[in-house]
Image: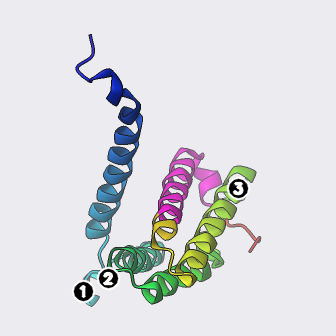
Amino acid sequence: MSLLHPSLRWALPLVAAGAGAAGALLWHASMMTCYADPPAAKRQDKSPLQQFMARKMEASSQILEGIVMENSDLIKQGGNSLLEMSKAEKFQVLTDQEYRLHNRQFREAVQRLIAAADKEGYDKAALAWFDVTISCVDCHDHVRKAPPAKASEKSSDK
């Protein structure tokens, strides 16, 4: 027996999708707090890769703030930073085809984000940001599951 009135059952998938998206955004915001830029003294204790990841989180924070505040300049600035960092050698941690696919999907999502910000389409920017976030999570999952020797290989592709 369903607790929902039959005329409202169509809304259940929409509510579930909205709750999932809200949860993802809250998770992302909490992760940004965990990776917030530490004071200079603490930053020196981090490896170069950890420092690089912290800069990616700073750019991510700019994007999220830009979406929430409807500030297209912040979105574009953060997006352009992510695009530039995605071309850096430190970003190329694997050489396999699946990693390259994740990398391409990430760049395409960031480009959609910037294009939406150019048109001040904040709803489209929020959706593109969700795609960027999902591509990050999927890629990090792939890197964590890669064999250790493979994960340390550097790609010459840029």
The mark that comes first in sequence, 1 or 3, is 1
Q: Amino acid at mark 1?
A: Pro
Residue 101, numbered label: 3
The N terminus appears in which quarter of the rendering? Answer: top left
Location of mark 2 (residue): 43
Q: Is residue 53 visible?
A: yes
Determine whether label 3 and label 2 are within 8 Å by CB.
no
Left or right for 36, reference 156: left
**Residue 39 disc label:** 1
- State which tag comes first along the sequence, 3 or 2: 2
Left or right: 26 as drawn, with respect to 154: left
Q: Amino acid at mark 2?
A: Arg
Nearest-to-viewer mark from 3 and 2? 3
Q: Residues within 10 Å of mark 2 (few under 14, many from 20)?
A: some
Secondary-structure class at tag 3? helix
Q: Residue furthest top?
A: 1
Q: Which residues are magenta?
A: 127-153
Residue at horizontal 33 percent and vertical 21 percent from the top:
6
Majority secondary structure in the magenta region: helix
Helix, strand or loop under label 1: loop
The reply to whether discs 2 and 1 touch (Cβ–Cβ < 8 Å) is yes
Viewer-nearest residue: 121 or 103:
121
Residue 119: x %, y % from top left: 56, 81
Q: CA distance from mark 2 to mark 1?
A: 6 Å
